[in-house]
Amino acid sequence: MDKKIKIARVVTVPFFLDNQLRQQLKYLVDEGIDVTAVASLEGDWSRLQAVEGLKCIPIDIARAPSPIKDFISLVNLYKFFKENRFDIVHSATPKAGLLCAIAAKLAGVPSRVHTFTGQVWANKSGPARWVYRLIDILITKLNTQCYADSKGQKQYLISEGVGQESSIKVIGAGSLAGVDLDRFDNGHWQQESMFRDLNIKKTDFIVTFIGRLSRDKGINELVSAFDALQKKYKHLHLLLIGPCEEKTTEINLRQWINIERLHYLGTKKNPEQYLNVSSLLCLPSYREGFGTVVIEAAAMKVPTLGSNIYGLTDAIQHEVTGILVEPQNTVKLQEALEKLVINEEYCKDLGEKAFERCRKEFDTTLVSQLLHQEYRLLMNKSKS
């Protein structure tokens, strides 16, 4: 009988575990793997704690750089890994990635794994770019295997000297954990009540943005493009869903909420409710590792208008499952958005094709099966 694999999945905050990895963790537990989820105490652990058989351990990992706090986190992670003798420690998010790589190496964990989900340094310059890139290089060198959540991201990391072809792999067609097709299912939600709550007609064209309201998500270009078009198309609406974490964006938001048919909804635990009434997802980001929200929208037959950048080029097939435009270009974004507003049947066809691709390539069960196979390979390598 095969030895039961003992794994720790480590990220910075529990929201990431809950929102991105909960279904995958449940799958692995159901497959007989001993799984421990590790993140900071802050945040809601309730849905993770409800997963039968999943162990939940809070270890504080500060999101912002803090030498003293980071050293304490490093010591706590080292002690935890040493005491529990994990076969595999698997991290995600940059801060958790670096601390786990060091702590797991010192603790003698045989298989140390990290998944890259985007590079904070991709659009930076000067010392900040050098430091953050160096962190990713260290993560790659200290771990036994790294993954990128898209093929485009893998090639970018290799081209930037972060890793080599053999040190960075992509699982399946990409994504961190796929998409839960049971959760993101149009049949679970009533459209009528949502239309009523938002004061929107069923015949209106609804563009939705889901993510951090920040400059590098392209929020300024999106609002500018929408503002120009909403004066011409009175059935056009924009839903902004997500936290506002930048001071400049917060100031801009006070003006944006005065734009007709722009709805700022804040952070929502169930974005699928809003995707259920959406005509189009818009994600004009400057950088993305993969763009999980793209396949979540696809699961609900909603196509995406996104930036032609690595990560999104893996999630969106241009003019097949969505439209790609030049990043940081309001004019091109506005032109593409207008094309879809005018031709709603074309937009719906993109959504149907996005759904078919999502079902075939990004079902969370499929992605989790492939990850399970990777864990088995790592176990076999550590024995040899």
Image (cartoon, grey):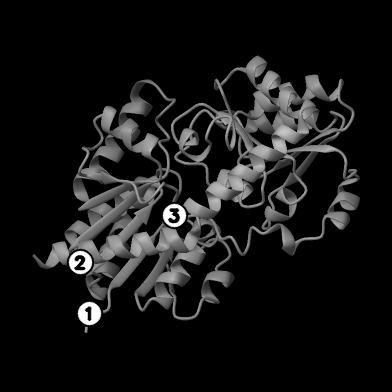
The answer to which image quadrant residue 107 occupies is bottom left
Whether pointer 2 and pointer 1 mark residues with C-beta atoms closer than 8 Å, the reply is yes
Task: Answer with left or right where residue 221 lies relative to residue 379.
Answer: right
Earlier-in-chain disc, 3 versus 2: 3
Secondary-structure class at tag 1: loop
| Residue bearing mark 1 | 3
Task: Give the residue number, with chain letter if any, for mark 3.
Answer: 12
> Residue type at mark 3?
Thr
For the residues labelled 1 and 3, the Cα–Cα distance comes to 29 Å
Query: x%, y% of residue 377?
Result: 22, 62
Residue drawn at the location 38% of the way across and 48% of the way down? 95
**Location of residue 51 with respect to 234 vertically, above or below:** below
Q: Which residue is mark 2?
A: 379
In the displayed structure image, the side of residue 304 where residue 52 appears, left or right: left
Q: Which residue is pictured at 87% across the width and 30% down the height? A: 260
For residue 196, side relative to residue 167 (left or right) = right
Q: Secondary structure at mark 3?
A: loop
Viewer-nearest residue: 381 or 60: 381
- In the rendered view, tell whether residue 124 sits above or below residue 99: above
Nearest to N terminus: mark 2 or mark 1: 1
